[in-house]
Image: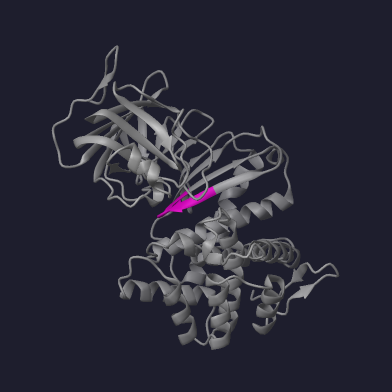
C-alpha cells in the first residue's frame, strides 16, 4: 500500500488508468509526501487551487527532472524530459489564503484537517505558455484533470461522518471538504459533530454548543427547514502569538472549517463573543445556502452570497447580542464606511476581485441585500433567497448571476429606479459613493442616521 521510499527518489507503483492518481501520505516521522501519476507524459502542470501561489519553496521535488516553481502568479510543475510521475515532500500550508480555503488545518494536538481539493491540476505546454498567461492558477483556462486522491496515514482518518483506518480513497469535486487525520475522538452534540481544538480557550469552547444551538434554531426558522444531519465542524486554534484577533472560516457543503488566533482570546471578552457569534452565524448561513441547493457563484459577483450571508448573520447575531442597537450600529457603521472606501477608488463593485479588495463584497453586498429586502412587496431576505435558489435550480443554471438576482427582485416588487441604481453600483463606477449609498438607504426607508462627522450610527432594520 502507498509509497515506496528509495535513497534517490520516491517511486510510485500504479497501473495505467485514464485518470490522474494522487497519493498523499503522512510519514511516521511527521513528513508529508505527495505523489502524482499522470495518464500521459507531461511537460508542465498547473496547480488550480487558490488564486495565489504558495507551494514554491515549501514543496521539495523527490523526482529527478521535476521542479516546482512559481511562474507569474501560478504554481507549476516543470518536467525535463516529459514524464508521467512527480513526487514531492511538502511543508503543509496552514495559514489562510485570500479567497481560498486553507490547505491544511493544524490542530494543537498534532491532528490535521486536509483539504481534498488542493491537488487539482491542469496540463500546460511548458514554461513559456505559463509565463505568457496574465491570470493565476485558479483562472487558468485548461481543463482540469480527472483524478483520484488517496490519503494514507498510520493514524485514523475521518471523512463524511465515518472513520477509516490507514487509507481513504476519494474523488474530489472542486475544493471538496476536509479530511481529519489524527488521534482525537470525534465530538458530538445535538448541533454538530467534529473536532474542536483542545488548545482553544475554554471560554470560547464552553460557549460553542449554546451559540450553535441558538444560531441553527434561528436559521432553521428563517429558512423554513432543519438540516438533515448535524453540521460537521473542524475548529482550529492557531495560537496567541500575534496581537489582537484573527479568524477565518468557510462552509464546504455541510462542513464548517474555522480558524482563530491572537492574544485577544486569552481573556474572556463580551465584545469578542458577540463578534464570534457573527462569525459562526455567517459561516452557518452558507451551510443553509448550500443545503438549499446553491450553484456556483462568479467570483466577480461574490457580493450576492457573501453580502446576504452577512445580512443574515447580523440579523441573527443582533437578536443574540446583549445590546442589539449597539451591535447593529457598530457593524453597519463599519459596513457603510468600508463600502464607501472601496467605491471611492473609482472601481465598480464587480471589479473588487481584480483589485484584491474582496472584503468589499461583504460590506457592499450586505447593503445591497438590505435595500433589496426593503423594496420587496412581501417577504424578507430569507424568503427572497429561498426563491432565488429555487428558480436557479428550476432553470438549471451552473452559476447564479446578477441579472437573475435583479430580475427576480423586480418581479417581487423592487422599484425599477432602485434596481437600476443597484445595478449601476455593481457594474459602473460610482461618482459620489457616500451620497449615493446614503440616498439609497433613505429611499429604501431604512432611515439612516449619521453623527456630526458623517459616520452611520443606526438604521431601522427588521428584527
Q: Horizontal and vertical percent for residue 345? A: 64, 62
Q: Quadrant of residue 103?
A: top left
Question: Where 128 falls versus 249 (above or below)?
Answer: above
Residue 354 is left or right of residue 401, and the answer is right
Q: Is residue 210 left or right of residue 325?
A: left
Q: Residue at the location (53% across, 76% down)?
A: 423
Is residue 252 one of those drawn in magenta? yes
Q: Main secondary structure of the magenta part?
A: strand
On-image quarter of the N terminus: top left
Please state the horizontal and vertical placement of residue 4, each as a whole percent of the image: 25, 19
* Residue 174 vertical placement versus 41 (above, below): below
Q: Position of residue 340 (x, y in %)?
A: 68, 66
Specify whether residue 431 is painted magenta.
no
Q: Measured from the top left, where is residue 171 in percent x and y?
A: 27, 45
For the residue pair 322 and 462, the one nearer the viewer reads as 462
Q: Which residues are magenta?
A: 249-256
Q: How is the image coloured?
A: one colour
Amino acid at each position: 500500500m502507498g509509497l515506496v521510499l528509495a535513497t534517490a527518489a520516491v517511486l510510485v507503483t500504479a497501473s495505467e488508468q485514464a485518470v490522474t492518481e494522487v497519493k498523499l501520505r503522512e510519514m511516521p516521522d511527521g513528513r508529508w509526501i505527495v505523489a502524482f501519476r499522470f495518464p500521459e507524459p507531461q511537460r508542465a502542470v498547473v496547480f488550480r487551487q487558490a488564486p495565489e501561489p504558495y507551494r514554491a519553496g515549501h514543496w521539495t521535488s523527490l523526482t529527478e527532472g521535476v521542479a516546482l516553481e512559481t511562474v507569474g502568479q501560478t504554481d507549476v510543475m516543470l518536467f525535463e524530459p516529459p514524464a508521467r510521475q512527480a513526487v514531492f515532500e511538502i511543508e503543509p500550508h496552514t495559514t489562510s489564503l485570500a479567497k481560498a480555503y486553507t490547505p491544511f488545518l493544524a490542530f494543537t494536538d498534532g491532528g490535521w484537517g486536509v483539504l481534498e481539493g488542493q491537488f487539482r491540476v491542469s496540463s500546460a505546454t511548458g514554461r513559456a505558455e505559463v509565463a505568457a498567461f496574465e491570470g493565476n492558477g485558479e483562472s487558468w483556462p485548461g481543463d482540469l484533470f480527472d483524478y483520484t486522491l488517496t490519503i494514507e496515514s498510520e493514524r485514523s482518518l475521518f471523512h463524511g461522518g465515518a472513520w477509516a483506518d490507514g487509507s481513504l480513497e476519494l474523488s474530489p469535486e472542486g475544493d471538496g471538504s476536509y479530511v481529519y487525520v489524527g488521534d482525537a475522538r470525534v465530538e458530538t452534540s445535538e448541533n454538530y459533530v467534529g473536532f474542536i481544538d483542545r488548545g482553544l480557550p475554554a471560554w470560547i469552547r464552553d460557549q460553542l454548543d449554546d451559540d450553535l444551538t441558538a444560531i441553527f434554531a434561528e436559521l432553521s426558522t428563517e429558512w423554513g427547514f432543519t438540516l438533515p444531519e448535524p453540521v460537521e465542524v473542524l475548529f482550529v486554534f492557531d495560537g496567541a502569538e500575534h496581537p489582537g484577533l484573527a479568524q477565518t472560516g468557510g462552509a464546504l457543503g455541510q462542513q464548517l472549517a474555522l480558524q482563530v488566533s491572537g492574544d485577544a482570546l486569552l481573556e474572556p471578552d463580551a465584545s469578542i463573543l458577540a463578534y464570534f457569534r457573527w462569525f459562526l452565524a455567517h459561516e452557518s448561513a452558507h451551510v443553509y445556502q448550500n443545503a438549499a441547493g446553491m450553484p456556483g457563484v462568479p467570483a466577480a459577483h461574490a457580493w450576492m452570497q457573501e453580502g446576504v450571508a452577512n445580512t443574515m448573520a447580523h440579523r441573527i447575531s443582533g437578536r443574540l447580542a446583549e445590546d442589539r442597537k449597539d451591535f447593529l450600529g457598530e457593524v453597519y457603521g463599519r459596513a457603510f464606511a468600508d463600502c464607501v472606501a472601496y467605491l471611492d477608488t473609482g472601481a465598480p463593485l464587480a471589479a473588487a476581485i481584480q483589485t484584491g479588495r474582496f472584503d468589499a463584497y461583504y460590506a457592499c453586498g450586505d447593503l445591497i441585500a438590505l435595500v433589496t429586502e426593503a423594496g420587496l412587496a412581501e417577504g424578507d431576505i430569507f424568503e427572497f433567497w429561498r426563491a432565488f435558489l429555487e428558480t436557479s435550480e428550476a432553470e438549471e443554471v451552473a452559476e447564479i448571476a446578477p441579472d437573475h438576482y435583479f430580475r427576480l427582485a423586480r418581479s417581487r416588487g423592487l422599484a425599477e429606479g432602485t434596481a437600476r441604481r443597484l445595478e449601476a453600483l455593481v457594474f459602473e463606477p460610482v461618482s459620489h459613493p457616500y451620497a449615493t449609498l446614503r440616498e439609497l438607504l433613505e429611499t429604501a426607508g431604512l432611515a439612516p442616521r449619521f453623527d456630526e462627522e458623517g459616520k452611520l450610527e443606526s438604521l431601522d432594520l427588521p428584527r
